[in-house]
């Protein structure tokens, strides 16, 4: 279906798929599995590498020499895109959203990685970042370079293909073991991953249904509309023989409480995975999706005998800047903060 579309060869495939026996037993419901897309093979891994595998092939073919992009201050996207650019000798300018006047003195988490990767970093206030990016593009053109502006999260039809093929890989892996998958649960931010998994589930899934938790940057209604438009644009652009009904786009917005905000339920999910399975999930994205999975198990949505796969989309570099609140949660103390100090509203 999309085999003819070139990729850049960034991925280590297939990423592992394995059971979560202790978490399954703890929750007492369905059989839980995890698809380890934290191990996609570039930098700190994560879901963005699947998108970049397609996006970078196109960027290289068009001969760009600079990538201009951005996102929130502690962005996994910024880490992955700069790592991919470095692999191919391109330069990266990151326009990151921070609070007004924020001077990053603590080089922690993804911010440290952005510095280590050698990106040029500009911290802009939220509402002005699009203008700043366009100014950077102009500045580079004036200096004789050939820059490309890439969407936040790589969520455009070409990037969406990363998870159309990601689900094909998952379903093939499962069927080789005689495993039929009922649900795929993951975090949804800029929407490209969900658009891809929903299309992939329809194309290859044999009844696989995708359940997503938003990470708090937009409401259920706005997020669902965004995913709908990405799905429609991707199906049209690549003439995919797939139709997706509105009720196949399932996105919850009650598990995040604001983008990157620290909540007891998310921090419980982080602690649970470490204690029960020896696995690290991040407090921003995968914790929101795991809080969703735990809640839906407790509510009886996912049942005994069903196979539920959690898609680990990466992001563990964000564990470290959450150190104070992770310690609070483990000690049973009130959280030192809910809104992170680097939040634009913080
Ligand atoms: C970006 C990201 C997501 C969300 O992916 P989108 O395609 O932006 O919706 C989920 N998990 C992690 C760890 C991420 O970095």
Image (cartoon, grey):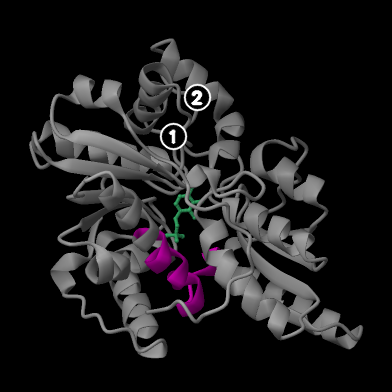
Q: Which residue is mark 1?
A: 262
Place of residue 140 in the rendered image (x, y in percent of width and height, measured from the top left): 84, 80
Badge 2 or badge 1: first in the primary sequence = 1
Q: Are marks 2 and 1 in contact (CB under 8 Å)?
A: yes
| Residue 53 appears in view | yes
Within-10-Å neighbours for mark 2: few <14, some 14–19, many 20+: many
Q: Is residue 128 above or below residue 295?
A: below
Q: Position of 65 compared to 144: left or right?
A: left
As measured in the structure, the alpha-carbon distance from the residue carrying label 2 to the one carrying label 1 is: 7 Å
Secondary structure of the residue carrying numbered label 2: helix
Place of residue 97 in the rendered image (x, y in percent of width and height, measured from the top left): 62, 57
Q: Position of 2 compared to 106: left or right?
A: left
Place of residue 48 in the rendered image (x, y in percent of width and height, measured from the top left): 54, 58
| Residue 134 appears in view | no
Which residue is the extreme one toward the right? 143
From which residue to which does the magenta span run? Answer: 153-167
Q: Position of 65 compared to 298: left or right?
A: right
Query: Magenta-highlighted stretch: main secondary structure?
Result: helix
Instruction: Give the numbered dot on residue 325.
Output: 2
Place of residue 104 in the rendered image (x, y in percent of width and height, measured from the top left): 75, 43
- In the rendered picture of this protein, how many numbered marks are placed on residues? 2
Residue at 26%, 71% (x, y): give it: 203
Secondary structure of the residue carrying numbered label 1: loop
Residue at 78%, 66% (x, y): give it: 88
Q: Is residue 217 above or below residue 137?
A: above
Q: Nearer the viewer, residue 91 or 324?
A: 91
Q: Position of 80 compared to 275: left or right?
A: right
Residue at 92%, 83% (x, y): give it: 143
Residue at 78%, 60% (x, y): give it: 86
Within-10-Å neighbours for mark 1: few <14, some 14–19, many 20+: many
């Amino acid at each position: 279906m999309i085999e003819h579309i070139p990729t850049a060869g960034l991925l280590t495939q297939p990423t592992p798929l394995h059971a979560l026996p202790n978490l399954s037993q703890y929750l007492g419901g369905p059989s839980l599995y995890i698809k380890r897309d934290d191990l996609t093979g570039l930098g700190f891994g994560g879901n963005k590498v699947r998108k970049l595998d397609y996006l970078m092939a196109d960027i290289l073919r068009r001969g760009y020499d600079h990538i201009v992009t951005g996102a929130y201050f502690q962005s996994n996207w910024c880490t992955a895109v700069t790592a991919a650019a470095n692999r191919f000798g391109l330069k990266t300018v990151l326009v990151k959203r921070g609070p007004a006047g924020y001077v990053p003195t603590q080089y922690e988490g993804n911010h440290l990685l952005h510095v280590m990767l050698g990106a040029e970093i500009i911290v802009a206030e939220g509402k002005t970042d699009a203008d700043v990016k366009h100014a950077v593009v102009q500045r580079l053109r004036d200096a004789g370079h050939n820059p490309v502006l890439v969407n936040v999260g790589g969520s455009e039809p070409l990037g969406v293909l990363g998870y159309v093929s990601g689900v094909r890989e998952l379903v093939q892996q499962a069927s080789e073991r005689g495993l039929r998958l009922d649900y795929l649960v993951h975090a949804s931010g800029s929407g490209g991953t969900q658009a891809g998994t929903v299309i992939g589930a329809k194309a290859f899934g044999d009844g696989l249904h995708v359940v997503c938790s938003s990470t708090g940057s937009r409401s259920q209604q706005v997020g669902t509309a965004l995913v709908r438009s990405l799905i429609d644009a991707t199906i049209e652009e690549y003439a995919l023989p797939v139709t997706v009904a509105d009720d196949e786009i399932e996105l919850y917005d009650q598990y995040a409480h604001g983008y990157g905000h620290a909540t007891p339920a998310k921090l419980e999910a982080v602690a649970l995975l470490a204690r029960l399975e020896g696995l690290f999930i991040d407090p921003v994205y995968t914790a929101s999706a795991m809080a969703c999975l735990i809640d839906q198990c407790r509510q009886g949505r996912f049942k005994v005998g069903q196979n539920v796969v959690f898609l680990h989309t990466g992001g563990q570099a964000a564990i470290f800047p959450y150190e104070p609140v992770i310690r609070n949660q483990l000690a049973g103390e009130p959280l030192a903060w809910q809104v992170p100090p680097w939040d634009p509203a913080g």
